[in-house]
Amino acid sequence: MLSYQHLYHAGNLADVHKHAVLAVMLDYLTRKDKPLSYLETHAGRGLYFLDAPEAVKTGEAAGGIARAEVAGWFAADHPYARRLAEVRAAEGATAYPGSPLIAAGALRPGDVMHLAELHPGEFAALQAALPARAGLHLHRQDGLQMALSLAPPMPRRGLMVVDPSYELKSDYEAIPGFFASVARKWNVGVLMLWYPLLPGAPHGPMLAALEAGHPGALRHEVHFPPVRAGHRMQGSGLFIVNPPWGIEEETQRLSKLFG
């Protein structure tokens, strides 16, 4: 959806949930001395500044990452905290990394990144945030099509993040078949889907189909009140196929923090 821009929502509680889990999974995957692939279907601009008018207007970062840090949710050696510190050291105190920068900070020489973003302005910002280097591939195209064309990627070890805007009903409808196709081609890949928890549970049929097709997957949801009047998001969900060992410990810790 070309109207969606994540700058209004960067650093909110859903980002804290998603990025903390992603950082821990990448930390685990990069401990083994074997290269891996990282794919992202809806990359966004990669780097956000939380003092931008768009971010200040919604107040979502103030109720998200700022709240989490004041409350001490993440120790300095937590993978998510390390990525935040690295990006702030390079870009300034108000900088916030999207998942492409969280991944870029965790990956090593020899690892490969494929990032898709269709929005022209967001893609240009992504290019600026992640200068060209060996192993980095930026795709201005539909992210689901990119992932299907690459699966299985080389190296075969790796992780894919799927994070649509969910502004269209078709976003929900396309995911189960897409996951089935990617998993069939890339049976060793860690596949992570993020989805919002909204009134009426529009994610319900999608999750039912995903759970039927991937019985060993991990589903983790956290709940929080809407950040402002009229805001519909009431929580954040992750569905992870082939979850890395030990990730349940982090999700259980986050469940207690979100309360």
Image: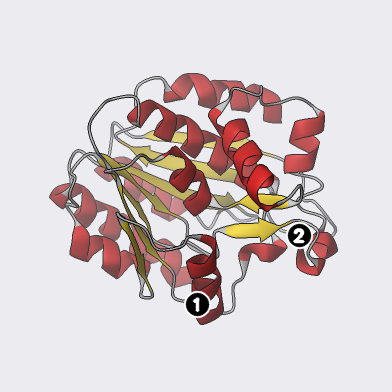
Residue 154 is left or right of residue 28, and the answer is left
Q: How crowded is mark 1: few (under 14 residues within 10 Å), some or many (20 or more)?
A: many
Q: Is residue 180 above or below residue 111?
A: below
Looking at the rendered structure, the secondary structure element under dot 2 is loop
Q: In which quarter of the image is residue 41?
A: bottom left
Taking the spot 48% from the left edge, 62% from the top edge, the residue there is: 164
Query: Can you say which quadrant of the picture contains the C terminus?
Result: top right
Closest to the observer, 214 or 91: 91
Foreground: disc 1 or disc 2 = 1
**Residue 188 visible in the current orientation:** yes
Q: Where is residue 234 in the image (x, y as percent from the top left)?
A: 69, 48
70 left or right, relative to 4 = right
Q: Can residue 166 be seen in this view?
A: no
Which is nearer the eye, 102 or 128?
128
On screen, 132 above or below 182?
Answer: below
The image shows residue 217, relative to residue 114, as above or below, that is above
Q: What amino acid is at disc 2?
A: His
Q: Which residue is drawn at 29% across and 31% down?
A: 216
Q: Measured from the top left, where is residue 53 in percent x and y?
A: 82, 68
Task: Give SS at disc 1.
Answer: loop
Sequence-earlier tag: 1 or 2 = 1
**Which residue is label 1 attached to?**
119
Label 1 amino acid?
A: His
Q: Distance between the residues labelled 1 and 2?
A: 24 Å
Q: Residue at x 77, y 61 (%)?
A: 55
- For label 2, the residue is 231
Badge 2: few (under 14), some or many (20 or more) residues near its Cα, within 10 Å? Answer: few
> Count of labels shown?
2
For image coordinates 25% across by 44% down, the residue present is 213
Are the two marked residues, 1 and 2, in contact with CB atoms closer than 8 angstroms? no
In the rendered image, residue 236, in percent from the top left (x then y), is placed at 59, 45
Q: From what the image shows, is residue 6 above or below residue 89? A: below
